[in-house]
């Protein structure tokens, strides 16, 4: 029997939510892979700082990826796990070979913008569907991501050594 029969959520609304969660999952997976590349490829004076910061970020993204996938399962659907499928739907595109810290951080901020917009849409639809668990999960993501955006943006604004 579907878990939806036990948790009392509307099937049609939940299918809409899981479609959006699978889209978020695809974007998070490409984001994760891009940040792993930044971690590996970064060079220069800020290597030690950014190498460590990017590791923190991809570890955090990996946790979120798992939480999104497991929430899709709780809602009775399958999380997509083929990278070829992620690349077809992800608005975040693959980025590789970035050696400059400022460039990597600009990509990260652009990726966050895409992710946070998608998450706000999920907040709206889960609010309407009374899906408080998904709503709380995505709210907790946005809380942390807004803080990261502030910090990465501050870093970018203050690294003026090339000006
Ligand atoms: Fe590493």
Image (cartoon, grey):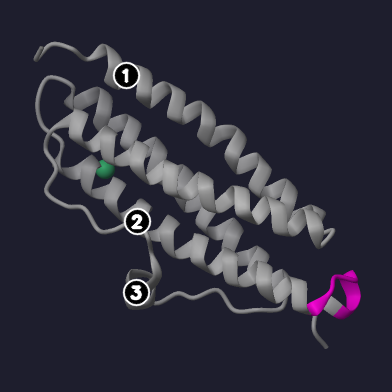
Q: Residues within 10 Å of mark 2 (few under 14, many from 20)?
A: many
Secondary element at image label 2:
loop
Residue in the picture at 88% in, 70% down: 7
Q: Which residues are magenta?
A: 5-11
Inspect the magenta stretch and tell me whether residue 137 lies in it.
no
Please name the residue that numbered disc 3 is placed on: 88
Inspect the magenta stretch and tell me whether residue 6 lies in it.
yes
Residue in the picture at 36% in, 36% down: 109
Q: How many marks?
A: 3
Please name the residue that numbered disc 2 is placed on: 92
Residue 3 in view in this figure = no
Secondary element at image label 1:
helix
Q: Earlier in the sequence, mark 3 or mark 1?
A: 3
> Image quadrant for the N terminus?
bottom right
Q: Position of residue 139 (x, y in %)?
A: 67, 42
Disc on res. 51: none
Q: CA distance from mark 3 to mark 1?
A: 32 Å
Ligand 1 image position (quadrant):
top left
Disc on res. 155: 1
Residue in the picture at 39% in, 77% down: 82
Closer mark to the observer between disc 1 and disc 2: 2
């Amino acid at each position: 029997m579907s878990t939806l029969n036990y948790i009392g959520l509307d099937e049609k609304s939940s299918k809409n939510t899981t479609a959006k969660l699978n889209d978020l999952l695809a974007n998070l997976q490409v984001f994760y892979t891009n940040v792993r590349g930044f971690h590996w490829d970064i060079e220069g004076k800020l290597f030690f700082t950014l190498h460590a910061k990017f590791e923190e970020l991809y570890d955090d993204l990996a946790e979120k990826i798992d939480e999104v996938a497991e929430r899709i399962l709780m809602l009775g659907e399958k999380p997509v796990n083929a990278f070829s499928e992620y690349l077809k739907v992800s608005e975040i595109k693959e980025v590789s070979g970035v050696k400059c810290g400022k460039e990597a951080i600009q990509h990260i901020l652009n990726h966050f913008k895409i992710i946070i917009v998608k998450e706000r849409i999920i907040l709206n639809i889960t609010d309407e569907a009374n899906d408080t668990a998904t709503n709380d999960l995505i709210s907790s993501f946005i809380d942390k991501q807004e803080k990261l955006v502030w910090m990465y943006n501050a870093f970018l604004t203050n690294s003026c050594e090339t000006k």
